Amino acid sequence: MLIRFAIMILACAAVLAFDAPHYKMSNKRGHVVYGIIMAVAVYLGLDYAVGKDWPDLHDLVDFVFSAPTKMIVTYFESKS
Amino acid sequence: MKVKETVSPLQMSTLFFIFMTGSAIINIPGPLVGFAKNGAWVSLLISGAFGFLVLACILYLHDKFPGSTYIDYTKKMLGSWVTALLSVPFILFVCHMASGIVLDMGLFLTTSMMRKTPVFVFNAFTFTLIAFTVRAGIEVMVRMFTNLILIMLFFVFIVLLLSIPNYHPDYIFPIMPDGIKPVMQGAYFSFGFPYAEAFLFTMLLPFVKKNPDKKNNRLNGYMYLALVLNILILILSVVCVIFVSGPIASDIKYSLYMVARMIDFQDIIQRIESVIGMTLIAGSYMKATIALFVLNLVLTRLFRLQDDRLLIFPLALMCLFLSVVLYDSEVQWYDIVSNTWPLWNGIAGILPLFLLTLITAFKGGGKKTGSGGP
């Protein structure tokens, strides 16, 4: 877990260091959007680091689409 | 914000061909044969026909709103709030796509070649390369990818050619032993990947150089040609896989990889499956790059940011972490890709596209001169 934390911090730091000049030159809207995306990235990074399978995009997609998908697949797999 | 880069109609159609064929040629045959058995090529014809419909809508909207992206003309036709609403599934879908493509490549490498290496290593290197490629811009992408796809196709054709001694043409019969439903299931799967994903090009067509000669619109012709070539190549690879392995092709995830493994030409050319491995990696890299480029462009246009390169690295980082947390098990991953993906694709991209096309057709929206565009 420590190694994963280190990797996560390293990756985030690398991105922030690289983007620092562009971030400074950007306007407030750019700062907000950048911040939101980085926040999501940090959340997913922490999910990767702790390995606890926190809710992610797959869970959302599964929640929304699993029932209709099952209906479609059942229809296709039923005998004609 | 003005688009500084432009590509020719031929380059855009090449990019389209690369996007549709890049990873599909390796990933499609196995699962498709699993669903449709010997009728897999019929499934591709059906899903390809729907692909033509999708492409027709994309080109119609591009013609009505020259120089405008999907976000621009959706704002014009439906307003900002509806655009923001429709953008949410679009953005989530493209994130999922980019992460899934790289994850698939990482899983291929960790299951077939380097089993002890964590998948994060492959995904991290890939996303770093993808981020820098996106940063270089669409002109660089197209030029580089044209070379890569030619090399890819060369190797695929060599493999298919050298496999001729292993072909059993009688394996193709009977064509639909269980009726039409398995073929329709195969068409449902292949529609989701790759044909429905073409809606991403609603964001890329504005990069095509404006053609002052309206009578000679080559873009449409080239795009349709690219789609036809894609369908033919996928059918060829599926049929060849069936010729080699028959019904057991469905049990092998990377069928073309298995076909390459079986090549034994004069005891000199043997075990050339690593060539297909390289093809898979190159194809996945190109497709994921286009997906990340579109994702960055959507967010930049939606929020009207001045710097179109600001979000590339955070998006790549987000997709990287998403790619490593997405995967729970083989069964779950197979279920997403085979069954859920076409529906997710349809809701996120195709349904809004069709809706917008119908509204534009009825309202008669759009102007002949490019307004509101780059």
Image (tube, coloured by chain):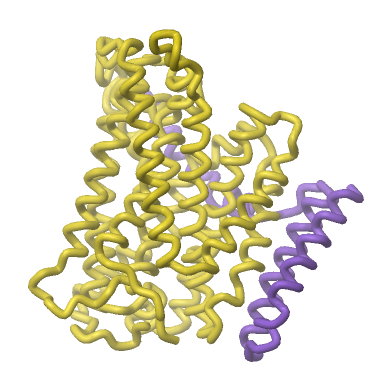
Chain colours: A purple, B yellow
Asked if residue A9 lies left or right of residue A58, the reply is right
- x and y, in percent, of residue B330 in the image: 63, 32
Q: Name the residue located 61 percent from the left edge and 50 percent from the top edge.
A: B126
Asked if residue B196 lies left or right of residue B114, the reply is left
Q: In the rendered image of this protein, does residue B130 appear above or below residue B170?
A: below
Q: In the rendered image of this protein, does residue B212 appear above or below residue B112?
A: below
Asked if residue B165 lies left or right of residue B133, the reply is left
Residue that lies at the very extreme toward the right in this rendered image:
A2
The one nearer the camera, A20 or A3, is A20
Q: Name the residue located 77 percent from the left edge and 65 percent from the top edge.
A: A12
- x and y, in percent, of residue B3 in the image: 40, 80
Count of marks, rendered view: 0
Q: In the rendered image of this protein, does residue B161 appear above or below residue B334?
A: above
- x and y, in percent, of residue B154 in the image: 35, 36
- x and y, in percent, of residue B120 in the image: 72, 46
Q: Quadrant of residue B117?
A: top right
The one nearer the camera, B58 or B102, is B102
Could you tell me which quadrant the N terminus of chain B lies in?
Answer: bottom left
Could you tell me which quadrant the C terminus of chain B lies in?
Answer: bottom left
Residue that lies at the very extreme toward the front in this rendered image:
B268
Q: Name the residue located 29 percent from the left edge and 36 percent from the top edge.
A: B233
Q: Name the residue located 37 percent from the left edge and 65 percent from the top edge.
A: B352
Residue B278 shows in the view: yes
The one nearer the camera, B260 or B228, is B260
